[in-house]
Image: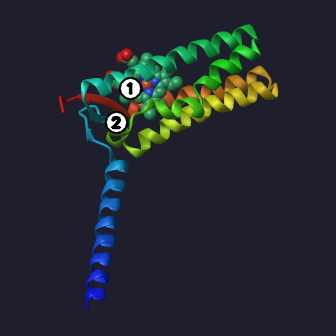
Amino acid sequence: MRTMNFKKLFAYSIGLWLITLVAAGYYYAMGRVEKNSDRRYAITLNEAERLTVLKQMGTLTQGVSDTLSALADNDSPHLIEVTRALGRARGRHEIPEALSFKLPLEYKQLMTLTQTGFDALANMAERGAPRDAILRQFARLTNLCVTCHGGYMIRVRAY
Ligand code: HEC
């Protein structure tokens, strides 16, 4: 009899755990978004989180500028340095977990693609790929900036 109860309890706890997992997965995928009047999704963040995102954007803009300078100068070591710095290895740690839960999955995927895009540039530079091929890849990368800006904006709410 006692063991039966434990078995039941075990089944219930597994059930609860699964429900929690599914709910957490749902919130993680959806983020906190509303459709805005200009058809962009508004991501609701608090002020500190907005500043985190904008700081990341400042880093990306600096990266675009540095990448272009290195390409113009044909300076391969500099190109590798600035592009690698924005790749997966470093960029992954830039979004705090609480913020990550408020960002929709597509947004996070676009950000991951942006980071792997910088890694791809670094890999090409390391392989000694021709400059026009690197530029073409760079244009694909900057198109990700355009795509995300066209789809998302931030709305600030105090909580
Ligand atoms: C996955 C989404 C996403 C990607 C990819 C992305 N951005 Fe952004 N960016 C945003 C959001 C969201 C904002 C804030 C818009 C707002 O003010 O509501 C923003 C704002 C900016 C701003 C304004 C910053 C400020 O201080 O107001 C700059 C500059 C910028 N992005 C540059 C870039 C560049 C350059 C790239 C590509 C290398 C890029 N972004 C890629 C989402 C993205």
Q: Which residue is nearer to you in this view: 66 or 77?
A: 77
Q: Position of residue 66 (x, y in %)?
A: 61, 12
Ligand 1 within 8 A of label 1's CB?
yes
55 over 91 or under it: above or below: above
Q: Is residue 13 above or below residue 144?
A: below
What type is the residue that disc 2 sits on?
A: Leu
In the rendered structure, the answer to whether residue 129 lies left or right of residue 27 reads right
Which corner quadrant of the figure contains ligand 1?
Answer: top left
**Quadrant in the picture for the N terminus:** bottom left
74 vs 143, nearest the viewer? 74
Q: Which residue is drawn at 49% across and 33% down?
A: 93
Dot 2 lies on which element?
helix
Residue under label 1: 53
Answer with the quarter of the image where residue 103 lies: top left
* Contact? badges 1 and 2 (CB < 8 Å): yes
Q: Which residue is drawn at 44% across and 21% down?
A: 57
Q: Looking at the image, which residue is at 82% across and 25% down?
A: 128
Disc 1 to disc 2, how far (Cα)?
9 Å
Mark 2 Cα shell of 10 Å, populated few (<14), some (14-19), many (≥20): some
> With 61 as the anchor, is 82 left or right in this view?
right
Residue at 71% over, 25% down: 134
Q: In this image, 93 relative to 74: left or right?
A: left
Q: Judge depth for marks 1 and 2 and give the one in front.
A: 2
Q: What element carries label 1?
A: helix
Residue 109 at x, y percent in the picture = 48, 42
Q: Is mark 2 within 8 Å of ligand 1?
A: no
The residue to which callout 2 is attached is 99
Residue 108 position in % (x across, y down): 44, 40
